[in-house]
Amino acid sequence: MKQRIDRRHVDQCATIKPVTGWTSYLKSLECTACRREFGADHIHNVCPSCGKVLFARYDLVGLRNAASPDDLRGRRWDMWRYHELLPVLDAANVVSLGEGATPLLDVDRRVCARLGLGVGRLRIKDEGKNPTGSFKARGMAAAISKAKELGVAEIALASAGNAGSAAAAYGAAAGMKAHIAVPRDVPPLNLDAMRMSGADVLLVDGLIDEAGRIQHQHAIEHGWFELNTLKEPYRQEGKKTLGFELAEQGGWGPDCLPDVIVFPTGGGTGIVGMWKAFEELGALGWIGPKRPKMVVVQSTGCAPLVRAFEEGVEHAQPWQGAATIAAGIRVPSAIGDYLVLQAVRDSGGTALAVADDEIRAAQREMARDTGLYTSLEGAATWAALTALRRRGFVSGHEDIVLFATGIGT
């Protein structure tokens, strides 16, 4: 069976079916470190035993016997088309602004040739098309929907910018109060969006890690539920729909995934979520054994995961004096570092850092060559192509997908 999503998805709006027969195969939560299991019917953040990341687990055997990719035909054209593998049990609790189903754009052959990729294929997943202008909308849609289902009234998190915009918007849509701590130099567009959606915004002198420490104390004092990156089980569930979409856009089956995925990485939920998606789809038999090589891109001014990858260690030491123009990847430390590094290594991928001047130049070049004005974080993936080609990591024959994770600013 070959089924594809493309830029013509708007034409299918008239044939979208209403939500009927909603089923989630969610069964439990599992710690990614100590492997303890917990019920998914209670509120959780990290593993109470070891403090590591919790993953939502699904009844994949039951789903494999009950459904196939054919069942997606005619469904709503957003990330909730994959509801069997998302954590919301009752469709009435879904908080959606139309996130997901973003286009996968082919880069012109003449541009590919100039980049040394003339024999291969280069595509861009344009996440700026999401409701709040970035891929963060996916994670917040899943996390806030599940929080609503579990009776949460107020949420709290620290953000470098885009996650805060998304949390504010989805919190407003859910009728929840959002409390967001951000660095004082947060991009003005994000700050305006948070305030416009009615969020309580705290400006912090410091980076996202300091904002997180301060907001954690406030959350404890006031009883707010924390939605920080990989410190609750469901943001990565929204992010994993990136992987589902790549598989569906590739037509499902053994050859549906690209050879290489290049992703700008701060906290790591994009890489972690997609790798989880491929694991689940493989268990269902909806894709074959082939997996893309996962490439982490960071800035030379903040590259803890790159350093850890190069040193061959499991955890990344915090980056001192983090500084980069790309706010979304200015993350000195990440709780899910071990999951990101495992995905990169298991896939045969790599991690590399690019300088700020390269990122800025790539943003202009990408806009002029493709017409896509992406965020600085997304532009970092374009900047990384030159280094990947120079190092011989890519030969020019591969099918490569870059993630433009947000709109340009």
Image: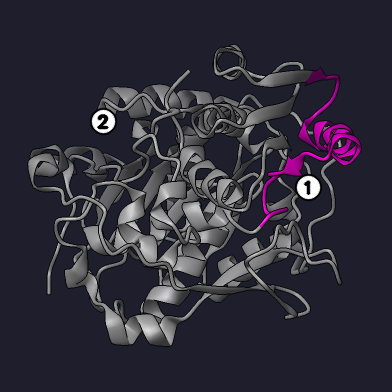
Decide: is 124 above or below 131: below
- Magenta residues, start to end: 203-232
The span from disc 1 to disc 2 (Cα, nearest Å) is: 33 Å
Decide: is 279 above or below 399: below
Q: Earlier in the sequence, mark 1 or mark 2?
A: 1
Q: Residue at x 18, y 39 (%)?
A: 108
Near mark 2 (Cα within 10 A), the count class, few <14, some 14-19 or many ≥20, is some
Mark 2, secondary structure of its residue: helix
Residue with the mark numbered 1: 333
Decide: is 174 above or below 310: above
Residue with the mark numbered 2: 370
Classify residue 329 as left or right of residue 379: right
Picture coordinates of residue 198, whole percent (x, y): 61, 17
Picture coordinates of residue 55, whole percent (x, y): 62, 67
Depth check, front residue: 14 or 180: 14
Q: Nearer the viewer, mark 1 or mark 2?
A: 1
Circle 1: residue type: Ser
Q: Residue at x 63, y 61 (%)?
A: 340
Place residue 7 in its image quadrant.
top left
